[in-house]
Image: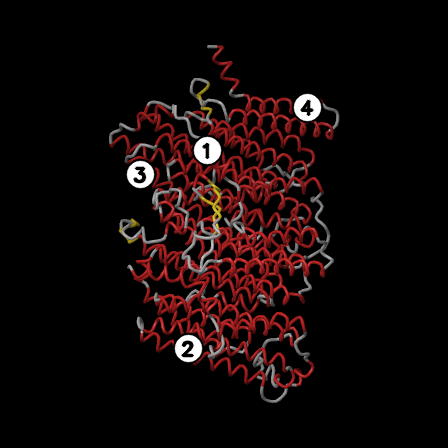
Amino acid sequence: MNIVMITNLSYYLPELALIAAMVLGLFAIAFSGSRDQSDKIVFGLTMLLLMVSYILLNNMMFAVPRTIFSSALVIDRFGTLFKIIMVIGTIAAIYLGRFSQDILPEIKSEFSIIVIGVLVGGMLLASANNLLIVYLGVETLSILSYALASFNRKNNKSSEAGLKYALYGGISAGLMLFGMGHIYGVLGTIQFEGIADVLSGLTLSDISILLPSFLLFFAGLGYKIATVPFHMWAPDVYEGSPLPVTTFFAVVPKMAGMAVIMRITMVFFSAEGVLQIGWIGLLSVIAALTMTVGNVAAIGQRSVKRMLAYSSISHAGVMLTGVITLNHLGTTAILFYGVAYLFMTLTAFYVTTFVADGCENDHFERFTGLVSRHPLMAILMSIAMLSLAGIPPFSGFVAKFNILAALIEKRYFVMAVILGLNSVVSLYYYMKIVRLMVLKSPESSAPVGGFGLLNQAVIVAFTIPTLVLGLFWQEMMSVASSASLLVK
Amino acid sequence: MAYLLNWILWMPVLGILGLFVIPGQSKGAIRYWSLLNTAITFVLTIILYMNFNTEVAGMQSQFDIRIPWISQFNIYYALSVDGISLPMIILSGLLFFLCILSSWTIEKAVKSYFILFLLLEASVMGVFMAMDFFLFYLFWEIMLIPMFFLIGIWGGENREYAAIKFFLYTFFGSIIMLIGIVALYNLSGKGIDSFNIVALAGGHFRDLTLNIFGYDLPFNKFFFVAMFIGFAIKVPIFPFHTWLPHAHVQAPTAVSVILAGVLLKMGTYGFLRIAYPIFPSASVYFGEAIAWLGLINVIYGAMCAMAQDDMKKLIAYSSVSHMGFVMLGLAAMTVQGMNGAVLQMFNHGTSTAMMFLLVGILYERSHHRWIVKPDGSRGFGGLYTQLPRYSIVFIIAMFASMGLPGLSGFISEALIFLGIYEKFTTITVMALFGLLIGAAYLLWMFKRMFFGEVNEAVTGYSDMNWRELSYMIPLCVAVVVFGIYPAPVLDVMRASVGKLVVMLSLY
């Protein structure tokens, strides 16, 4: 038993490395002499251990899929790829947090530590194999996120964001638990594989209880990835939170939620029946609404951060449309989308952060004439915007193309058209920034402080995958396509 | 020789790489480099023409390049050329070369301008050469990016609105097309040829149905309409034409030339290359509707042109009218009609390019384009006595655009009418009035600008200089030569167009 546990632990090393980073970080804060010193130590330490975790995850891509800890967690390529995306997102957020003025200098180390805590919760979700772990993951993710949202304690909006997030989070977690309770009550198991077995042979009366309980269950998850109608918190929280935190929220909790929705859908509902129709119907409607509402609301925004928040809502909707296809191409497309989305979002948020830092706020007007002040940054931001809108030859286009291909493979033409029209709508507001940056003359000629050589190099590094995956995506497709789910 | 198409496609990209190295201050070097680059591309297209075997019909038969690209979707980097795309490739090569000369006066952000311009050339060449559907779409979309910036940065006063409208409109059309492309890929079995434009052709999708909300819709008609909208926005066909006047008026001269001369042809090229061959039965079914839309284009475009006070807007609407003739020829689906349509695509490219270039030349002197100013006074007057060289070139361009016998427009329009008469007699007769209105608005514009009392403002204008003549004369020669002896162009396209007509006649 013990030996099994220890071998199991070896599959949990990436998470253990992160937990070690948290603990060591806390010790470093407690025992180091000055604030400045501890900041440096914690930054170095967290970066190092995140890298270690990344390398371990990379190696695990080649491991044989298995379940660990008495089937509580499942280690498969699907989850691992999601974890890799989340780790990269976290590295980017911590790096950004170190340079952003939005994170108060006296709590920079705490920021790194809390962010890693959220990441651990996210990774738990990505490999959850029973309902309890899902709940545990969601709560780990959420409770620390509330703190993160209100991280800029001198700013009223940030405090408001934290409170809103906590209230919404509390209610939706309650709903989710309520739903899970019913699911357990009817099926008598919390193991995914067990649920999948029982689901195939249910009577109609059981299903009539299960349908609403799955709806409640979905409410909890849908809240995490901000799907309509559980999205109300997202714009306020995204706007109120400090920019590095927003960057983080746009990637990690979203990917974690997407991973768990994907897993649940593939495991529970791959058998045809009333439940599948109900769940897929629910997801289709929600996906269509999420895309549309996110995009339409984004048009009128004044703050770039808020616009990006709405745009990330609509991207979650696009990824959900990949879930409803329930086929291999759909899974592949979502994984590809995740990778593409990660890098374009990072570029967009990085540029926004530095512009907002240099110009006091993040309104659209602050981007005016950026091309004459920082030509390279304006070009990279334009690339990110075009890519988010789905214009070739950038990765965002390929990602949408894959989702479209998956949808049409299942003959979901209406969904495909909705997705297409949404791309057109999104182009309008993404181009608004490009228009301001490139076509208008600048409001001042002063350079933006944050764009040092190193930061520019980092932004370039984040944009390279957007370019490469737009033209040479065969390799990434085969990685995503091999990242299948383990149902056990 | 086997990689000639690669060279033509990537030559502008090489030019862009070169431009990155040249510092932004040395404007002269940037201009000469771009000129050299486009000249080489043009020479390469001529070499392509020399080596082209006119007897062979259809794509995928000569100058083939086919390299696997994305194996999961069977996407290939596949280029080829046939009698329909070759005239377009030569036309693009010529116009881009001449437009660099006309862009000599651009002073704002010269380097970026030429980089975007060469990017535009590469993507246009790509559209006309692509044999893989995915690749085709890629070039079709990439083209929007340089266009957006070229209109948005170097355009007129209302440039931003025009740029974003153009971008959104075209993107809307192409995303619908993309859904069609993916649907075709799925329904043709996701095999090795599922993105191959040539292999998809031939009406494989005739009997398939499509279930939407419980209704069985005929697949080929449904997706013919999807493709139609994508291409119709580009042509532009009424009622999808509203972006065109804005884009044209706001765009800088060279970009207007490319827009009217080349980009509009991409729409009709799409019909010839994709919509017709892949959905022949639907094309025949919608033939009459296309003819009516073409007729509306001809008459409505001409009427709108008549009403304009802005010279450039007038020319822009005349493009709408002339593209209507192309649509009429396409709707005819007869040998003469189709040949006429392709020839008209080529001829309109040269004649409308002349008109836009002439507008640009005058604008550089007058800084306005009003035939009649908003306050009612005449914008120009008596130009004929002041600018004799300019006036002669203008007369040639105008008569070519009008379709006077002996100049290029006449032959293609005559062929189109010959082709369509037997099929849609009523439409033909009505469309003839379009020619009449066309003559009216052009001559009226000419009268108001060139004759009459000499306007005081006009007296200071200098006549065309050598640089301006150097890019107008080749076009004048083309217009006259192809008006008397169109055989070089017709010979090239005959086999390919014939093959398409034969295929359509089976349905």
Residue that numbered label 4 is attached to: A28
* Quarter-of-image position of residue A91: top right
Nearer to me, A288 or A37: A288
Residue type at numbered disc 3: Ile
Residue B109 visible in image: no
Residue that numbered label 1 is attached to: A259
If you read the primary sequence from the N terminus, does the residue marked by circle 3 or circle 4 appear first? 4
Secondary element type, mark 1: helix
Q: Are marks 3 and 4 on the same chain?
A: yes
Nearer to me, A120 or B271: B271
Q: Is residue A416 above or below residue A196?
A: below
Q: Nearer the viewer, mark 3 or mark 4?
A: 3
- Position of the C terminus of chain A, as image quadrant, is top left
Nearer to me, A48 or B339: B339
Residue type at numbered disc 2: Gly
Percent position (x, y) of residue B215?
27, 51
If you read the primary sequence from the N terminus, does the residue marked by circle 1 or circle 3 appear first? 1
